[in-house]
Image (cartoon, rainbow, N blue to C red):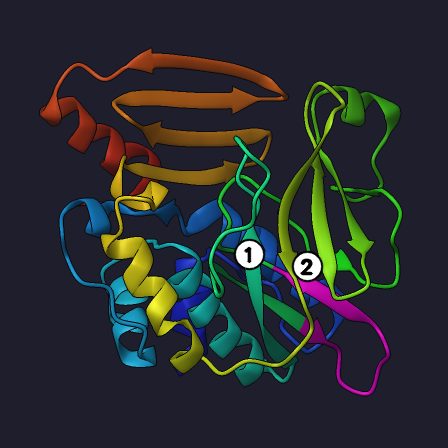
């Protein structure tokens, strides 16, 4: 792997070593600079999960992807740096009925620091979710952001927590209105990438039941919120305040793709 090229894609310029500070910095940089998107699915373009295909799309062609792509490539980087990475089988909660999605519905990562006991849930591929790794040793509320003041929290930064169950964990997100919402369930059994995830990736590319085949989205984190192009709308969230407007036409959509994401499709 050409690590400097990957770091340049994320605009990450700090020294790297396999420690908690680097892990946190890399996930934040990934979330802010490499978008979560399903544009190839909407355009009926096949997605391939080999390291070569992921590298070509995300690094060379300056694109984003969804969970299998983003976390698949990110795991490769983390292993090259020296982290211990485990691929996890996650299943997303349906917001309408609370049911779980298919097996291998989502790819998340457990990352360990070499010669240490700390374990972290790392995820750069769930879209609007935690920008920083979550600590498995802390099952309480984990507020995002370093050295947060009460003022910073009041501006809309979110919190997350991990709930341990009899057979795994559930990730919870605290929304801007202070309500808690389940995101996904996962267990800690090590899985094989990409083999175990190929069927789930194909399902989300082709099934009418998958949200990825029904509408388009491209989205990334910002320093104070998030910016997205979704279903013909530009959506910008700043300090918990959401603003959106319709996109006039295809030409404006392409211009916004370039302006906010550096993407040309």
Q: Quadrant of residue 129?
A: top right
Q: Nearer the viewer, residue 74 or 162?
A: 162
Q: Residue at x 41, y 72 (%)?
A: 197
Would residue 85 appear left or right of 134 to someone viewing this image? Answer: left
Q: Residue at x 25, y 23 (%)?
A: 232
- Within 10 Å of disc 2 (Cα), the crowding (few <14, some 14-19, many 20+) is some
What is the x, y in percent for residue 113? Answer: 75, 78
What is the x, y in percent for residue 242? Answer: 52, 16
Q: Residue at x 25, y 64 (%)?
A: 57
Q: Which residue does the numbered mark 2 point to in the structure image?
A: 24
Residue 40 vertical position relative to residue 96 in the rendered view, above or below: below
Q: Which residue does the numbered mark 1 point to in the structure image?
A: 91
Which numbered circle lies on residue 105? Answer: none
Q: Is residue 114 magenta?
A: yes
Region of the chain picked out in magenta, as a range? 111-122
Q: Is residue 258 visible?
A: yes
Q: CA distance from mark 1 to mark 2?
A: 24 Å
Would residue 83 appear left or right of 53 to someone viewing this image? Answer: right
Q: Is residue 61 magenta?
A: no
Would residue 193 appear left or right of 111 to someone viewing this image? Answer: left
Q: Nearer the viewer, residue 126 or 90?
A: 90
Would residue 1 appear left or right of 159 to someone viewing this image? Answer: left
What is the x, y in percent for residue 146? Answer: 79, 44
Q: Nearer the viewer, mark 1 or mark 2?
A: 1
């Amino acid at each position: 792997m050409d690590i400097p090229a990957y770091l340049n894609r994320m605009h990450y310029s700090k020294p790297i070593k396999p420690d908690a500070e680097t892990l946190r910095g890399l996930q934040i940089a990934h979330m802010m600079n490499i978008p979560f998107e399903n544009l190839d699915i909407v355009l009926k373009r096949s997605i391939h999960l080999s390291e070569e295909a992921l590298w070509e799309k995300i690094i060379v062609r300056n694109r984003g992807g969804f969970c299998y792509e983003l976390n698949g490539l990110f795991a490769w980087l983390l292993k090259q740096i020296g982290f211990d990475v485990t691929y996890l089988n996650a299943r997303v909660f349906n917001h309408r009925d609370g049911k779980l999605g298919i097996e291998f519905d989502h790819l998340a990562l457990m990352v360990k620091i070499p010669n240490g006991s700390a374990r972290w849930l790392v995820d750069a591929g769930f879209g609007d979710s935690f920008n920083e790794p979550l600590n498995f040793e802390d099952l309480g509320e984990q507020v995002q952001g370093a050295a947060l003041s009460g003022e910073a929290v009041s501006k809309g930064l979110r919190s997350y927590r991990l709930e341990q169950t009899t057979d795994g964990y559930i990730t919870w997100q605290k929304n801007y209105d202070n309500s808690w919402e389940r995101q996904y369930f996962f267990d800690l059994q090590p899985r094989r990438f990409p083999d175990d995830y190929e069927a789930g990736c194909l399902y989300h590319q082709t099934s009418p039941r998958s949200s990825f085949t029904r509408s388009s989205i491209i989205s990334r984190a910002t320093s104070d919120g998030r910016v997205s192009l979704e279903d013909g709308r530009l959506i910008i969230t700043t300090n918990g305040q959401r603003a959106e407007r319709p996109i006039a036409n295809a030409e404006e959509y392409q211009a916004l793709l370039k302006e906010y994401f550096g993407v040309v499709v």
